[in-house]
Image: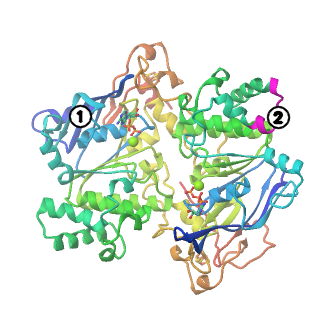
Amino acid sequence: MSEPILQVRDLVKHFPVQQGIVFKKTIGHVRAVDGVSFDLNRGETLGIVGESGCGKSTLAQVLMRLEQPTSGSALFEGVDMFGKKSASQLRQLRRDMQIVLQDPYTSLNPRKTVGDIVGEPFEIHPEVAPKGDRQRRVQELLDTVGLNPEHVRRYPHQFSGGQRQRIGIARALALKPKVIVCDEPVSALDVSIQAQVMNLLGDLQSEFGLSYIFIAHDLGVVRHLSDRVGVMYLGKMVENGTEEQIYEHPQHPYTQALLSSVPVPDPSVRDRREAIRLTGDVPSPANPPSGCRFRTRCWKAQDICAEQEPELAVRRDGGRIDLELADGHPSACHFAERHEHVVS
Amino acid sequence: MSATDESTGGSTKPRLLEVEDLHVEFRTREATANVLNGVGYHVDAGETLAVLGESGSGKSVTAQSVMGILDTPPGFVTKGAIRYRGEELLAATEDRRRELRGENMAMIFQDALSALNPVYTVGFQIAEQFRFRRGMSRKDAMAKAAEMLDMVKIPNAKQRVKEFPHQFSGGMRQRAMIAMSLALDPDLLIADEPTTALDVTVQAQIMDLLDELRRERGMGMILITHDLGVVAEVADRIAVMYAGRVVEESDAESLYERPAHPYTEGLMESIPRLDQKGEQLASIKGLPPNLANIPEGCPFHPRCHRATDECRRKVPELLELRPGRYSACHFAEELISSE
Ligand SMILES: Nc1ncnc2c1ncn2[C@@H]1O[C@H](COP(=O)(O)OP(=O)(O)OP(=O)(O)O)[C@@H](O)[C@H]1O
Ligand SMILES: Nc1ncnc2c1ncn2[C@@H]1O[C@H](COP(=O)(O)OP(=O)(O)O)[C@@H](O)[C@H]1O
Ligand code: SF4
Ligand code: SF4
Ligand SMILES: [Mg+2]
Ligand SMILES: [Mg+2]
């Protein structure tokens, strides 16, 4: 079960910051993703959380090969995704990884019918569904995601937000992928509709053995769906572990603050919670702080934090790296310390 | 309706704000949408009323009607009453309403950027109110503006007043909008999804700030949100809206302990929790109704797992079950007394 289907190593994506209209001059770089490594196991969900601008969508775009990485590697079932490949390897890779995006209003072409949208991947990959069979396949897909198969000729505007998200999911399923990258797939939805779509994603995973990379900023949503979770801050992965390790005993101060900021839906614990409040906002990724990027908002910061970047490694309480530690999980803090997180 | 009855009778001091049986329709060429169908709620000085409900349930339209900024046409108030300290606002002149806005009641929005003018400095926009409504000199008004920014904890406020909105981060813009709305010292603040666009760490800062300001100034606050977590942290009382009606009203603790309406119950069960990894979420089936064609009987019945024939025929009224607890469900009594 726990064999990796995707292995990402030191992935970097920098965007040039340019100035001037006629003579463009590069004056710096936005370090959107800046050395991220993780494994995605087959049949599992890896959740990615972090605040706006920390590089989650950029990571998704690079993994979908919609953006070229600046450096780093990713192996999909052992094949280097960014290296030279044969035409058939390339086709296979395109089929195997699909993406579902946040905005159900803009990610679907308004002039195409639902049938066209969901069946579009078959135009590029006719081997998956021969022409005569397509209509039936599309209707089957609509049924799979809980839409009425008779609505194939309707247009996106005739559907609600949650239904449009289902259309996006049906399209992602068309080529029978192995991995689906979900970039904030439920963030624009109301809670009751969000719950419907989350349940659907869960059902599809068990039915088709899918692996998900599930990006969201809602920590409750991520915990609900994920087996493992990675926490990002300013282009870096600062901690990762099983859903339980991250939520029950986070080690990195940022993870602790993030969890502590989430309001608890229970008024009776209102004044009993010890809340960690961060001050200020996330610094610009074009000019991140030296050393540990979190140090400008960290209440534990010492001199060493400005001088030396803490690597993501398994650490004992106090921060000492100890790769042998039995129940440890990696975090990137010189002073990492288990914090038994109490949410209610 | 019944939530506000006691205040209308004789000697009691009028409520800070009272909305009664408010009806609003939006008339377009294709159809008339019945957006509000008898909304009633009230807020007293110093307390926070949270208005909860999914998008389209009428939370913002109610607030816009209170502020007198409803988009007319297409929106029309067709029935009801809105009273501020006993004064009937729907009968007031436009001048009077403009006077009340800012001085007595103010509103902040989800999107601070659209509320701030991009071509003027943040300080200028705050100072304007002191100049035109308090007759202060330019210099004094600017100093007051800096004080306001300082009050909302913007670091280095004296410098920051000279900056433009785009030079502020999302969280700082929200603070600036709060400062602007409180400049004339209103005693009613309506916050419409004030933190929905913000990251959780910043959301927590802003909610703390709002709560602190409310307490210090003894303001009444209406907090509009769809986030059950945020509500639990700050609300004294809660009004849950569905299809343009209040379907449940309660103090915060009792509502979370035991909802008295199946819709509220469904919302609670839909939230994925932080403290446990669940299996299936108990979601509410179906979609909110089309407001041009609201189902007969209980508007929630097509989505309700308890619905009976009675529900399909008869609209449940918002009734008081226990002191301060109201529900518009035929089976409300069973819901709150069952184990
Ligand atoms: N094409 C681009 N050119 C320049 N900068 C970019 C580009 N795409 C993204 N960035 C920058 O990279 C950083 C990371 O952006 P990204 O969209 O990955 O964040 P995110 O974590 O997905 O945030 P959100 O939660 O808001 O979706 C941001 O500072 C963003 O402005
Ligand atoms: N200016 C407008 N024109 C037409 N319909 C509107 C307008 N403003 C709001 N509505 C409609 O009124 C209903 C309630 O809206 P609103 O109060 O904004 O809901 P919410 O509870 O999400 O704040 C929705 O169906 C919305 O589409
Ligand atoms: S390395 Fe230093 S600044 Fe960074 S999280 Fe740890 S204590 Fe804070
Ligand atoms: S009145 Fe009937 S349909 Fe409406 S909420 Fe109550 S049980 Fe459900
Ligand atoms: Mg993103
Ligand atoms: Mg609204």
In the rendered structure, the answer to whether residue A60 lies left or right of residue B125 reads right
In the rendered structure, the answer to whether residue A62 lies left or right of residue B86 reads right
- Indicate whether residue B186 is drawn in magenta: no
State the residue in front, A317 or B290. B290
SS label for mark 2: loop
> What residue is at 50 percent from the left and 58 percent from the top?
B200
The residue pinned by badge 1 equals B4
State the residue in front, A1 or A67. A67
Looking at the rendering, the stretch of residues picked out in magenta corresponds to A121-132
Q: Is residue A278 above or below residue B88?
A: below
Amino acid found under the numbered disc labelled 1: Thr
Q: How many marks?
A: 2
Residue B68 screen position, x and y as percent? 23, 41
State the residue in front, A300 or A11. A11
Q: Is residue A54 visible?
A: yes
Circles 2 and 1 on the same subunit: no
In the rendered structure, the answer to whether residue A100 lies left or right of residue B315 reads right
Dot 2 alpha-carbon crowd within 10 angstroms: few under 14, some 14 to 19, many 20 or more: few
> What residue is at 24 percent from the left and 68 percent from the top?
B145
Disc 2 chain ID: A
Q: Is residue A232 above or below residue B88?
A: below
In the rendered structure, the answer to whether residue B175 lies left or right of residue B44 reads right
Residue A50 screen position, x and y as percent? 59, 60
The residue pinned by badge 2 equals A126
> What residue is at 56 percent from the left and 42 percent from the top?
A106
